[in-house]
Image (tube, rainbow, N blue to C red):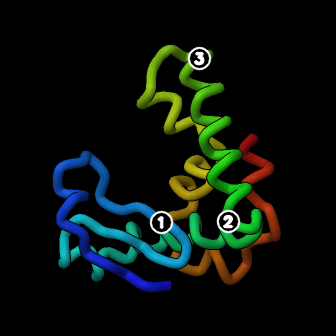
Amino acid sequence: MIIVCQKPLKKLKINGIALFPFIFIRKPEDKENNVLINHEKIHLRQQWEMLIIFFYIFYVIEYYYWVFKLKNSDLAYRRISFEREAYDNESNLDYLKNRKFWNFRKYL
């Protein structure tokens, strides 16, 4: 895992994004934000499990499925199984130590 602070993220409404093997964050002080970093580390694990490219394909398909169904991009983002797993467990800093393989499936 490599944490990088990126100025272009300042224009977006996101605090961080995981693009294997990097975690890009908006503000340098977020390197100390354990909850944010844990959230993104969960995504890195998901990406690794799905051989990276399949994660991105599935993520986009699932996102557009929910956009079509809900007619709301913010709600669609929150309904993505990968995001649900990450948000539900971001505060549990030991989550990745005990997480089962492909655990995001229970959020489908």
Per the rendering, the mark at residue 52 is 2
**Tag 2 and tag 1, C-beta contact below 8 Å:** no
Of callouts 2 and 1, which one flags the residue occurring earlier in the amino acid sequence?
Answer: 1
Residue 19 percent coordinates (x, y): 50, 66
Of callouts 3 and 2, which one flags the residue occurring earlier in the amino acid sequence?
Answer: 2
Amino acid identity at mark 2: Ile
Mark 1, residue position: 18
Whether residue 92 is visible to the viewer of this picture, yes or no, is no
**Tag 3 and tag 1, C-beta contact below 8 Å:** no
- Find the distance from the CA under tag 3 to the CA under tag 1: 25 Å
Q: Quadrant of residue 67?
A: top right
Disc 2 vs disc 1: which is toward the camera? 2
Q: Quadrant of residue 8?
A: bottom left
Circle 1: is it few (<14), some (14-19), or many (20+) Cα within 10 Å? many
Of callouts 3 and 1, which one flags the residue occurring earlier in the amino acid sequence?
Answer: 1
Q: Secondary structure at mark 2?
A: loop
Mark 3, residue position: 68
Residue drawn 35% across and 70% down? 24
Quarter of the image that includes the C terminus:
top right
Frontmost residue, 97 versus 75: 75
Whether residue 12 is visible to the viewer of this picture, yes or no, is yes
Residue 9 percent coordinates (x, y): 24, 58
